Image (cartoon, rainbow, N blue to C red):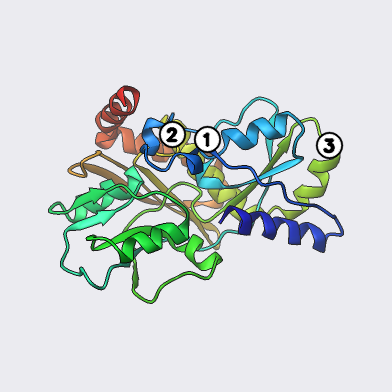
């Protein structure tokens, strides 16, 4: 997946007449396939290694799945471009041999919480590894299936027939978006890469990440947000979930585009006041003790 995303950026730069080459660097999240993500520092698990390479001038830009990027970037690193967004939905890839199983696999607390809220009689198993590894694990498991991002499977042409779109599940902030970052003081690189930016996607994912930041949630927290531009209106869906899925607070609101500046504050306040504050305290207590 990471290579596909990097190749996409490379090809888009080539379309602008800019030559580039790839440097492959394993992230901490890729290296440790056992420990749950919330035990690995909560934020920056998939970005810290690339951040270090960037600041040490080993690379000029880094390409990330934006949902994995902390809402506050390290000092000296800035967003250069957000590519046009792919589909945002989550999908369940089913194991046709265990359709009656009550076990679902996911490494995401957000997916876990939303699934258990809807299906409380299920149990959740951890699943890690690259997409191919996880798909193979589904086929050779006792699970009913595992949850994946639709965009990821489509991008590398691995979307199985035996999957169902979970249209009731609100995605992670910035799910389906690709972010390119670089050094703040490298003006030449910034000017080159900024040509790849998709303004509508950038605005929507910024609002989603602002909601996440206001709620003081990390990339792995069970917090969901989706902002979609519909003509002159932004449709916003967001939610905060208890870790066991028993409690949830969700909002769905519509805002005129001229109110975009206020959307994140309004939505995060609604979530907190409607019961999200207590859930957020639970999340913070759990992740700090893990």
Question: In percent of the image, x 42 and y 43: which residue is there?
Answer: 33
Closer-to-camera residue (21/175): 21
Q: Which residue is mark 3?
A: 187
Label 3's element? helix
Question: In percent of the image, x 30 and y 63: which residue is there?
Answer: 140
Q: Which residue is mark 1?
A: 70
Residue, far bottom: 161
Closer-to-camera residue (231/162): 162
Q: Is residue 237 above or below residue 152?
A: above
Residue 75 spot, x, y in % from top left: 66, 25
Residue 89, quarter of the rendered image:
bottom left
Q: Earlier in the sequence, mark 1 or mark 3?
A: 1
Q: Residues within 10 Å of mark 3 (few under 14, many from 20)?
A: few
The span from disc 2 to disc 1 (Cα, nearest Å) is: 7 Å
Q: Which residue is mark 2?
A: 218
User: Is 10 positioned to the left or the right of 122 in the image?
Assistant: right
- Say whether residue 211 is visible: yes
Q: Are marks 2 and 1 in contact (CB under 8 Å)?
A: yes
Q: Are marks 3 and 2 in contact (CB under 8 Å)?
A: no
The span from disc 1 to disc 3 (Cα, nearest Å) is: 23 Å
Label 2's element? loop
Label 1's element? loop
Residue 123 spot, x, y in % from top left: 18, 50
Residue 175 spot, x, y in % from top left: 49, 52
Question: In percent of the image, x 28 and y 26: which residue is there?
Answer: 281
């Amino acid at each position: 997946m990471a290579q596909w995303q990097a190749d996409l950026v490379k090809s888009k730069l080539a379309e602008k007449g800019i030559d580039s080459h790839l440097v492959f660097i394993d992230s901490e999240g890729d290296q440790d396939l056992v420990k749950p993500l919330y035990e690995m520092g909560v934020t920056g698990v998939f970005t810290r290694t690339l951040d270090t390479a960037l600041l040490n001038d080993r690379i000029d830009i880094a390409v990330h799945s934006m949902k994995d990027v902390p809402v506050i970037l390290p000092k000296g690193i800035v967003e250069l471009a957000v590519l046009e967004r792919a589909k945002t939905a989550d999908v369940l890839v089913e194991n046709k041999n265990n359709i009656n199983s009550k076990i679902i696999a996911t490494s995401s607390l957000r997916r876990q919480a939303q699934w258990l809220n809807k299906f409380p009689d299920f149990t959740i198993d951890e699943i890690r590894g690259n997409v191919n590894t996880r798909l193979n694990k589904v086929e050779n498991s006792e699970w009913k299936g595992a949850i994946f991002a639709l965009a990821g499977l489509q991008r590398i042409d691995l979307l199985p027939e035996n999957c169902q779109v979970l249209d009731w599940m609100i995605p992670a902030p910035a799910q389906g978006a690709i972010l390119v970052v670089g050094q703040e003081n490298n003006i030449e690189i910034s000017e080159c890469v900024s040509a790849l930016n998709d303004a509508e996607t950038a605005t929507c994912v910024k609002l989603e990440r602002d909601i996440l930041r206001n709620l003081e949630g990390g990339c792995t927290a069970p917090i969901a947000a989706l902002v979609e531009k519909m003509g002159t209106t932004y449709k916003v869906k967001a939610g905060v979930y208890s870790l066991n899925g028993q409690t949830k607070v969700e909002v769905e609101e519509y805002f005129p585009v001229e109110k975009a500046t206020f959307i994140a504050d309004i939505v995060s306040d609604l979530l907190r006041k409607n019961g999200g504050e207590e859930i957020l305290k639970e999340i913070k207590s759990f992740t700090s003790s893990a």
